[in-house]
């Protein structure tokens, strides 16, 4: 029962995160794109490693593909919301039946 509750909370959080990304609630998807997926925020270690290997990271062209990245992030949010909802329904059905 405890494990089911933990998984239920996990899938509920996954569903809510996906919904926030899909609906871009208060600019959440744009915030995720600007902070977590922006290579400008790499750690100095990661930047040195890329520079040492003479690699131009393709993500440094962030603003040329900004709209496509936002669209793809929102599509991934829809997939997360769907997976979360399926998990919540599946666990709820198994707890009620079992």
Image: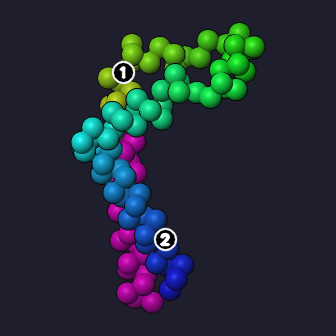
* Relative image position of residue 7 (x, y in whole percent): 49, 71
State whether residue 86 appears in this view.
Answer: no
Please name the residue shown 49% across and 74% down the image.
6
Direction from residue 77 to residue 56 in the image, left or right: right
State whether residue 14 appears in this view.
Answer: yes
First in sequence: mark 1 vs mark 2: 2
Q: Nearer the viewer, residue 65 or 98?
A: 65
Please name the residue shown 37% across and 87% down the image.
96
Residue 86, compared with residue 74, is above or below; it is below
Principal secondary structure, stretch drawn in magenta = helix
Element carrying mark 2: helix
Direction from residue 4 to residue 85 in the image, left or right: left
Q: Say if mark 1 contacts mark 2, CB within 8 Å.
A: no
Residue 45, compared with residue 78, is above or below; it is above
Around disc 1, counting alpha carbons within 10 Å, would you say few (fewer than 14), some (14 to 19), or many (20 or more)?
some
* Relative image position of residue 31 (x, y in whole percent): 36, 35
Displayed quadrant of residue 64 = top left
- Residue reaching furthest front? 44
User: Could you give the CA–CA distance between mark 1 and mark 2, rounded to whole angstroms?
Assistant: 34 Å
Element carrying mark 1: helix
Please name the residue shown 53% across and 27% down the image.
41
Residue under label 2: 7
Direction from residue 63 to residue 54 in the image, left or right: right
Please name the residue shown 47% across and 14% down the image.
61
Q: Which mark is residue 66?
A: 1
* Relative image position of residue 74 (x, y in whole percent): 33, 39
């Amino acid at each position: 029962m405890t494990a089911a509750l933990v998984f239920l909370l996990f899938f509920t959080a996954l569903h809510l995160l996906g919904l926030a990304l899909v609906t871009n609630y208060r600019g959440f998807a744009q915030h995720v794109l600007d902070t977590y997926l922006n290579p400008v925020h790499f750690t100095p270690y990661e930047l040195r490693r890329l520079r040492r290997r003479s690699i131009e990271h393709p993500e440094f062209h962030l603003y040329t593909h900004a709209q496509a990245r936002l669209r793809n992030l929102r599509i991934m949010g829809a997939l997360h919301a769907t997976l979360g909802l399926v998990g919540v329904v599946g666990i709820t059905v198994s707890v009620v039946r079992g």
